[in-house]
Image (spheres, grey):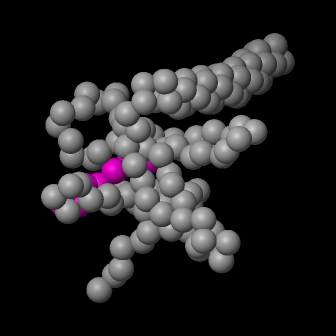
Amino acid sequence: MATERNPLEMILDEECFDPIILYNEKNEPIKFEQVFIYPDQNEDEDRFYAILRPEDDRKLAEDEALVYELLFDEEKLENDEIDGTIKEVDDVDIVNKVFDAYEKMYQEELKKTKQKSTKTSSKTTTKKTTKKSTK
């Protein structure tokens, strides 16, 4: 029987695309899709947040998700172990900050994709023009 992976390890693993399983107050498993991880680093304290989307929650619109804070067990971190808890964030300012960071990253990725697409299409146009002019 396969063992469930630690949700914190899964969230931090860039190669992991498996659903993250968290348990509700009734100890029922809920599968989440990871959307974004946000390290909020400042002078006082580093905090980490993740945007997670419940895979089967009918209460959320298709473009909605939830923000969770990743709380690490400091003793285990000192021994290179990743463990702790994941807590839903209800502070509107933090939720907005995390979603703003996600939106900024998303827009930057769109811009990069459009630039690559434009470069490719201008190369294609140049090649076609060159072929036509040699005939």
Residue 57, x across and y down, in percent? 21, 41
Vertical arrangement, residue 112 with respect to residue 51, above or below: above
Q: In the visual, does 64 lie left or right of 82? A: left
Residue ID at (42%, 30%) = 91
Query: 10 or 95: nearer the eye?
Result: 95
Residue ID at (23%, 54%) = 24
Q: In the visual, does 63 lie left or right of 125? A: left
Residue 96, x across and y down, in percent? 48, 24
Residues rendered magenta in the picture: 28-34
Vertical arrangement, residue 96 with respect to residue 69, above or below: above
Figure quadrant of residue 43: top right
Residue ID at (16%, 58%) = 26
Magenta residue check for 112: no
Residue 101, x across and y down, in percent? 58, 28
Query: 98 or 33: nearer the eye?
Result: 98
Q: Which quadrant: the N terminus?
A: bottom left
Count of marks placed on residues: 0
Residue 9, can we see it?
Answer: no
Secondary structure mainly formed by the magenta segment: strand
Q: In the visual, does 126 lie left or right of 78? A: right
Q: Which quadrant: the C terminus?
A: top right
Query: 61 or 97: nearer the eye?
Result: 97
Figure quadrant of residue 52: top left
Residue ID at (60%, 71%) = 75
